Image (tube, rainbow, N blue to C red):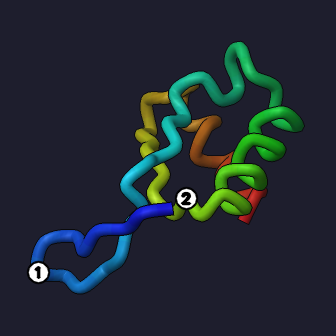
Amino acid sequence: MDYRILGRSGVKVSTLGLGTDNFANPTSQKESIQIIDRAIDAGINFVDTANTYADGESERIIGKAF
């Protein structure tokens, strides 16, 4: 996995990110957690989420996965 430094923060983020808009609907919680696990195994540390994705359910799933 390639990484870049995020601005002046010094934080190293993966060049590929995981989008979570489909978590909870149509992707089940179990499948979503499996996707997160595989992304982490691949070196992804950048997760795109918003409280509007599935009415906040995608964020709850991410919390359970971590």
Total numbered circles = 2
Q: Considering the numbered disc 2 on the image, is that residue within a helix, a strand or a loop?
A: loop
In the rendered image, the vertical position of residue 24 relative to residue 49, given as above or below: above
CB atoms at circles 2 and 1 under 8 Å apart? no
Quarter holding residue 48: top left
Residue lying furthest right: 30
Q: Please give the residue where the numbered disc 1 appears in the rendered image.
A: 8
At x 83%, y 44%, the residue is: 34
At x 58%, y 46%, the residue is: 59
Q: Which of the two residues, 46 or 54, is positioned nearer the viewer here?
A: 46
At x 73%, y 61%, the residue is: 41
The amino acid type found where label 2 is placed reads: Ile
Residue lying furthest top: 26
Q: Please give the residue where the numbered disc 2 appears in the rendered image.
A: 44
In the rendered image, the vertical position of residue 56 relative to residue 62, given as above or below: above
Pick whichever of labels 2 and 1 is earlier in the sequence: 1
As measured in the structure, the alpha-carbon distance from the residue carrying label 2 to the one carrying label 1 is 20 Å
Q: Which of the two residues, 17 or 20, is positioned nearer the viewer here?
A: 17
Q: Considering the numbered disc 1 on the image, is that residue within a helix, a strand or a loop?
A: loop
Residue 62: % across, % down: 65, 52
Residue 8: % across, % down: 11, 80
Quarter holding residue 29: top right
The amino acid type found where label 1 is placed reads: Arg
At x 75%, y 50%, the residue is: 38
Residue 63: % across, % down: 67, 58
Quadrant showing the C terminus: bottom right
Residue lying furthest bottom: 10
In the image, 19: left or right of 30?
left
